[in-house]
Image (tube, rainbow, N blue to C red):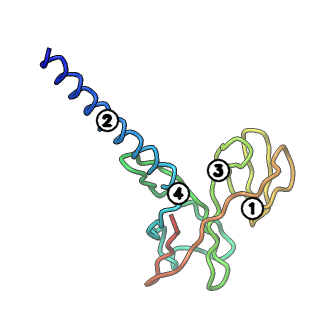
């Protein structure tokens, strides 16, 4: 009879510890967005390779945990500033193309102006922008 009691006690202890671990993990995931994230800047292109009035498409890799995703932005140089505009259309995520001072989406004929603001088509939101800075002659984007 004692071995049955010991087993039950051991099972209860196991269940208590396992439940505590699962509950702690769930509790931590709820508060994860409040955790301070490290600011990360990724190199995009040398400034001297960007021509004023031209949009240069640049690819970069985003790492989240073990997953890596390739993305791209258009870099537009205006004097000492560089604007980085996401190449994904805000309508359905197709890759836009830069032509004649406008961004055009080939999927549903959405058109954005040279700064990413919607002009026509089914698009209603502007193209997303990436914060940039210039360090040692290289344009960096905030990831």
Drawn side of residue 29 relative to residue 12, left or right: right
Which of the labelled discs sits on residue 18, or is there none?
2
Q: Residue 54's x, y, as percent? A: 66, 69
Q: Earlier in the sequence, mark 2 or mark 4?
A: 2
Q: Mark 1 falls on what kind of element? A: loop
Splitting the image into 4 quarters, where does residue 100 fall? bottom right
Residue on which the image places disc 4: 33
Look at discs 2 and 4 and give the one toward the viewer: 2
Look at discs 3 and 2 and give the one toward the viewer: 2
Which of the labelled discs sits on residue 88, or is there none?
3
Q: Quadrant of the N terminus?
A: top left
**Proximity of marks 2 and 4: CB atoms separated by less than 8 Å:** no
Q: CA distance from mark 3 to mark 2?
A: 43 Å
Q: Mark 3 falls on what kind of element? A: loop
Q: Mark 4 falls on what kind of element? A: helix
Residue displayed at 16% across by 24% down: 6
> Is 16 above or below relative to 99?
above
- For this orientation, the residue located farthest to the right is 120
Look at discs 1 and 2 and give the one toward the viewer: 2
**Proximity of marks 3 and 1: CB atoms separated by less than 8 Å:** no
> Is 125 above or below relative to 15?
below
Q: Residue 77's x, y, as percent? A: 63, 76
- Most foreground residue, 70 or 114: 70
Q: CA distance from mark 1 to mark 4?
A: 29 Å
- Most foreground residue, 36 or 85: 36
């Amino acid at each position: 009879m004692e071995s049955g009691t010991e087993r039950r006690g051991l099972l209860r202890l196991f269940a208590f510890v396992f439940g505590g671990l699962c509950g702690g993990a769930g509790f931590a995931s709820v508060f994860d967005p409040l955790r301070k994230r490290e600011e990360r800047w990724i190199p995009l292109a040398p400034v001297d390779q960007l021509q004023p009035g031209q949009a240069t498409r640049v690819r970069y890799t985003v790492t989240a945990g073990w997953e890596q995703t390739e993305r791209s932005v258009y870099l537009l140089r205006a004097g000492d500033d560089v604007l980085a505009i996401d190449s994904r259309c805000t309508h359905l995520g197709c890759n836009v193309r830069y032509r004649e001072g406008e961004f055009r989406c080939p999927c549903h004929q959405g058109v954005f102006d040279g700064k990413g603001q919607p002009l026509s088509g089914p698009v209603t939101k502007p193209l997303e922008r990436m914060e940039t800075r210039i360090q040692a002659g290289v344009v960096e984007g905030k990831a």
